[in-house]
C-alpha cells in the first residue's frame, strides 16, 4: 500500500516545492572535545537587526536549560540537543504540526509491502544540504548505514539509540537517485514513528567524509538552519538555509544559549535579551501571564519524571523496600507545591497520553505508615538504610530537579531512610548514570520523553531486560515483561498492542521498578509580537516558521 499526500511521481514534477509541514523530532551522549569553546564569551543579546534582503526577523535568541552535547543527530539522547538538531536536519518523514501523526518530509510518499517488511521512500528532488550537495538516496543510505553498521568506515559514534530505533533494518537499497528501500528483519509497528525522530536526521556524506570525527562539532544537514558557530557552554549560532526546500526562514540569525538558572532565563526574556525560553519556572508563570508583551505556552506531553533505583544493590534488591519508597513520597504535594500544577502525579510507566496507559492502575498513593510497615517487614529499622541520591543541577526535561529531589529526601527521612544528595552538572551527571557510575549509586533522578509518541519508546527502553545496561539503568529484569514488550513491538493490531502494554505496565508497577513521580507538562514562553511558533507534544522546537 502507498501512503502519500501528493500525486504519484509521474506528476510530482509539477509540484516539487509544495509546502509539507514542519520538521521532525527525535529522546545523552557525552560531549566531544573537538569543538571550539570559550568561557569568556557572553550569550548573544537581542540586536533586533534585520537583513532586509533575506529576512523580516532579525536575530532571534532562544534560551534552553542546557547546551547541546553534540551536533551529530545520531549521537544525541537528550531533548535540548534534539531541539537544536530539529532546526538543522530533515528526516524522511515528520510529524504533523500539532500531533504525533506522520507527514511527508524529505520523502514525499512511500510504499509499505503487504508483509510489512519493506518500506520504499520516494524523495523530493531539489532538496540540498548546507554544503550545496544534493539530498539523494545515497545520502539516506549513508546516514543509516553509518549508525547501525559498527564496521562502517564512517561509524563515528557512539550512537546510543541507533539499535533501538533502527536495529530492525536488515538492508537499505538504493533503487534510483531518489528512491530508497528499507528491508526489515521483522515487522515493526513503530517503524515509521522511529523514522520521524531527529536521531535519523539525514547528514551530508561529503561533510562526514571530510570532517571525520569532527563532524560531531561541525555537522551539516539539510534543515532550515545551518551551523555557523558553536561555543560550548556559551551559544550556538545558526544562519538561515537560503536554499531550503520548504522556504528559507524569516529569521536572519538564530542564537541558542544554554541558561541553566530558571530565574535568569525568565529575566532575560522579560528584559528583551531573549525571545523564547523553555522550561519555565513554575513560580514565574503568573508573572509572565500578566505581561502583555509575553505569551505563556503550556502543553501536556508524554514525559515521565522518575527516580531510578539500583535493583542490583541493597536495599533496592528487596521488592518491599522499593514499594516502601514509592508509598513514602507525596507526589501530589510535589506537583501542587513545587511544580505549581505543571505536572500530574504519576501512577505507572505510561502517561495518559499513551495508548497503553491503564486508568485502573492506582500506583502508590502517599501512605508513610504503609511505607514504614513494608520496611519493617523487610527487616529494616529506622536509620538502618543510608543511600546516596545523584541528581543534576538542571537538564533536559528535569523540571525542578533540586527542589523535587530535596522533597523526596525529606519524605524518605520521615520513614527512617537517610538520603545523601550529590548534585552534578548535566553532562557529568549523564556520564555518571549512563557510563557505569550507576554501579556505585543507589538512586538518581531522571526523566524520559518518548520523542516518537509511541509506547514502545518508553517501555522497551526503560524496562526490557534486553536494554540492560543502557537505558534500563536500574537493572530491572522480568522475563514475562520482556516477552510482552517484544510481542508488542511487532503487533500491528491497535487493541491487542495496547493490551500487551497495559499488562506489562501492571507488572512493572507492582514490582516498583522505579519511583514514578510525575508526568510533566511542557512549558515555554516567548515574546508576543511574533507569530509562527507553537509547541509540539514531542517537545521538539521548530522556529523555522516564525515571522511567516
Image: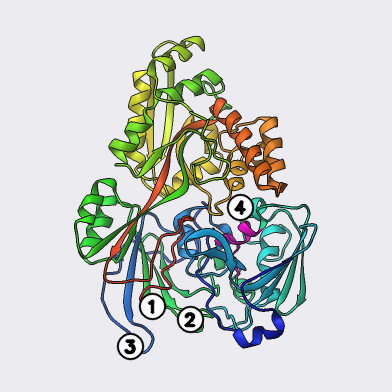
Query: For this rendering, which residue is in front, 395 or 40?
Result: 395
Q: Is the magenta stretch mostly helix, strand or loop?
A: helix
Location of residue 206 with respect to 454 vertically, above or below = below
Task: Evaluate whether residue 469 shows in this view.
Answer: yes
Type of colouring: rainbow
Disc 2 versus disc 3: nearer the observer: 2
Q: Which residue bears the numbered disc 3? A: 52
Label 2 crowd (10 A; few <14 / some 14-19 / many >=20): some
Residue 65: which quarter of the image? bottom left
Under circle 1, the secondary element is: loop
Q: How far apart are marks 4 and 1 (CA)?
A: 34 Å
Location of residue 45 with respect to 548 vertically, above or below = above
Q: Give the side of residue 261 with respect to residue 7, left or right.
A: left
Q: Give the side of residue 80 with respect to residue 10, left or right.
A: left
Q: Give the range drawn in magenta.
A: 192-202
Check contact, mark 2 vs mark 1: CB within 8 A: yes
Check contact, mark 4 vs mark 2: CB within 8 A: no
Q: Which residue bears the numbered disc 1? A: 548
Nearer-N-terminus badge (4/3): 3
Under circle 2, the secondary element is: loop
Under circle 3, the secondary element is: loop
Which disc number belongs to residue 247? Answer: 2
Percent position of residue 165, x then y: 64, 54
Task: Evaluate whether residue 427 shows in this view.
Answer: no
Q: Which residue bears the numbered disc 4? A: 161
Percent position of residue 506, x then y: 58, 30
Nearer-N-terminus badge (2/1): 2
On whether residue 198 falls in the magenta region, the answer is yes
Nearer-N-terminus badge (2/3): 3
In percent of the image, x 49 and y 53: which residue is there? 78
Query: For this rendering, which residue is in front, 438 or 307?
Result: 307
Amino acid at each position: 500500500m502507498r501512503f502519500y499526500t501528493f500525486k504519484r511521481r509521474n506528476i510530482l514534477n509539477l509540484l516539487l516545492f509544495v509546502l509539507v509541514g514542519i520538521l521532525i523530532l527525535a529522546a545523552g551522549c557525552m560531549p566531544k572535545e573537538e569543538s571550539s569553546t570559550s568561557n569568556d564569551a557572553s550569550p548573544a543579546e537581542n540586536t533586533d537587526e534585520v537583513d532586509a534582503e533575506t529576512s523580516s526577523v532579525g536575530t532571534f535568541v532562544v534560551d534552553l536549560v542546557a547546551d547541546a552535547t553534540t551536533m551529530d543527530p545520531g549521537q544525541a539522547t537528550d531533548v535540548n540537543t534534539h531541539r537544536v538538531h530539529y532546526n538543522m536536519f530533515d528526516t524522511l518523514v515528520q510529524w504533523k504540526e500539532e500531533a504525533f501523526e506522520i507527514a511527508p518530509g524529505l520523502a514525499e510518499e512511500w510504499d509499505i509491502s503487504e508483509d510489512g517488511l519493506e518500506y520504499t521512500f520516494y524523495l523530493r528532488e531539489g532538496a540540498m544540504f548546507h554544503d550545496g550537495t544534493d539530498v539523494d538516496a545515497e545520502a539516506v543510505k549513508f546516514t543509516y548505514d553509518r549508525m547501525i553498521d559498527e564496521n562502517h568506515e564512517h561509524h563515528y559514534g557512539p550512537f546510543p539509540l541507533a539499535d533501538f530505533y533502527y536495529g530492525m533494518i536488515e538492508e537499505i537499497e538504493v533503487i534510483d537517485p531518489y528512491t530508497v528501500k528499507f528491508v526489515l528483519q521483522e515487522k515493526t509497528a513503530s517503524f515509521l514513528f522511529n523514522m520521524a525522530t531527529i536521531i535519523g536526521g539525514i547528514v551530508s556524506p561529503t561533510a562526514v567524509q571530510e570532517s571525520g570525527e569532527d563532524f560531531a562539532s561541525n555537522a551539516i544537514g539539510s534543515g532550515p538552519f545551518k551551523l555557523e558557530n558553536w561555543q560550548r557552554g556559551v551559544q550556538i549560532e545558526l544562519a538561515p538555509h537560503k536554499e531550503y526546500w520548504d522556504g528559507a526562514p524569516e529569521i536572519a540569525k538564530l542564537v541558542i544559549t544554554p541558561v541553566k538558572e530558571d530565574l535568569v532565563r525568565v529575566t532575560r526574556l522579560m528584559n528583551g535579551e531573549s525571545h523564547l525560553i523553555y522550561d519555565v519556572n513554575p513560580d514565574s508563570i503568573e508573572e509572565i501571564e500578566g505581561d502583555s508583551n509575553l505569551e505563556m505556552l503550556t502543553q501536556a506531553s508524554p514525559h515521565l519524571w522518575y527516580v531510578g533505583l539500583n535493583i542490583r544493590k541493597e536495599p533496592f534488591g528487596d521488592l518491599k523496600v522499593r514499594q516502601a519508597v514509592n508509598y513514602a513520597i507525596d507526589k501530589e504535594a510535589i506537583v501542587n507545591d513545587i511544580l505549581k500544577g505543571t505536572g500530574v502525579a504519576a501512577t505507572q510507566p505510561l502517561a495518559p497520553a499513551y495508548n497503553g496507559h491503564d486508568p485502573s492502575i492506582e500506583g502508590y498513593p502517599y501512605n508513610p505508615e504503609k511505607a514504614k510497615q513494608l520496611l519493617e517487614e523487610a527487616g529494616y529499622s529506622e536509620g538502618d538504610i543510608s543511600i546516596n541520591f545523584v541528581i543534576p543541577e538542571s537538564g533536559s526535561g528535569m523540571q525542578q530537579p533540586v527542589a523535587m529531589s530535596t522533597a523526596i529526601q525529606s519524605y524518605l527521612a520521615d520513614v527512617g531512610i537517610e538520603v545523601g544528595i550529590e548534585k552534578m552538572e548535566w553532562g557529568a551527571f549523564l556520564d555518571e548514570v549512563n557510563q557505569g557510575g550507576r554501579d556505585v549509586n543507589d538512586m538518581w533522578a531522571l526523566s524520559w520523553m518518548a520523542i516518537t509518541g509511541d509506547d514502545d519508546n518508553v517501555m522497551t527502553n526503560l524496562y526490557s531486560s534486553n536494554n540492560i545496561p543502557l537505558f534500563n539503568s536500574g537493572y530491572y529484569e522480568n522475563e514475562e515483561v520482556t516477552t510482552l514488550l517484544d510481542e508488542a513491538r511487532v503487533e500491528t493490531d491497535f487493541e491487542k498492542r495496547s493490551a500487551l502494554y497495559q499488562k506489562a505496565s501492571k507488572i512493572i508497577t507492582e514490582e516498583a521498578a522505579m519511583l514514578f513521580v510525575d508526568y510533566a507538562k511542557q512549558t515555554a514562553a516567548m515574546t508576543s509580537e511574533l507569530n509562527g511558533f507553537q509547541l509540539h507534544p514531542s517537545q521538539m522546537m521548530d522556529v523555522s516558521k516564525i515571522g511567516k
